[in-house]
Amino acid sequence: MTKTRMVTQFGMGTSIRSRDYTEAAARAIRDALWHNSLNVADAFGFPKEAMLIDVEIGVQDPAAVDPAALLRIFPYGQPSVRLVKGGLDVDKPDGSGTSVIANAAIVVSFDMEPEHG
């Protein structure tokens, strides 16, 4: 297989009050996806299910993210999620909580095996 990167998308998401790392990550993914209408699969004659979607999410507490919940966001393709330490936690000045910022990088690729013959 020759995995060829076609698109890279970036997004940011927050959980202002509930310190919900999964929700912040989901919002980052939606931010990256919903700003674009990509027709890459159609342009190359591939079914949308052939999209190889690599998602990297940066949050301060990667273990607090539910990857299965993030995978359910994608309506098609073959998504995979990698969680890394990143993003930002911002304590509220009155000590009443922490706001969470998540960053997402989404790479869409296809198996572009060259034809032989």
Image (cartoon, helix red, strand yellow):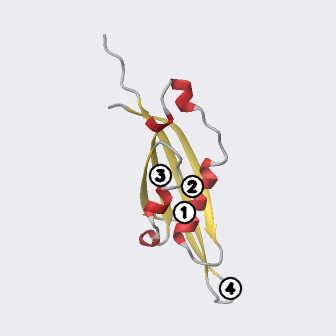
Left or right position of 48 against 37: left
The earlier-in-sequence mark between 3 and 1 is 1
Relative to residue 26, is residue 20 depicted above or below? below
Instruction: Evaluate if marks 2 and 1 touch, with contact meaning CB atoms under 8 Å apart.
Output: yes
Instruction: Evaluate if marks 3 and 4 touch, with contact meaning CB atoms under 8 Å apart.
Output: no
Tell me if mark 3 has few (under 14), some (14-19) or many (20+) residues whose alpha carbon lies within 10 angstroms of its own: many
Relative to residue 101, is residue 2 depicted above or below? above
Task: Determine the CA span between mark 3 and mark 1.
Answer: 10 Å
Task: Determine the CA span between mark 1 and mark 4.
Answer: 23 Å
Tell me residue 64's x, y (percent).
45, 73
What residue is disc 4 on?
93
The residue at 49%/71% (across/down) is 60
What residue is disc 3 on?
55
Q: Which sits in the foreground, 48 or 33?
A: 48
Task: Determine the CA span between mark 2 and mark 1.
Answer: 6 Å
Secondary structure category for the residue under label 3: strand
The residue at 50%/24% (across/down) is 45
What residue is disc 1 on?
25
The earlier-in-sequence mark between 3 and 4 is 3
Amino acid type indicated by mark 3: Val
Amino acid type indicated by mark 2: Ile
Task: Determine the CA span between mark 4 and mark 2.
Answer: 28 Å
Q: Which mark is residue 29?
A: 2
Tell me if mark 1 has few (under 14), some (14-19) or many (20+) residues whose alpha carbon lies within 10 angstroms of its own: many
Q: Which sits in the foreground, 76 or 110?
A: 76
Instruction: Evaluate if marks 3 and 1 touch, with contact meaning CB atoms under 8 Å apart.
Output: no
Which callout, 3 or 4, points to the residue nearer the camera?
Answer: 3
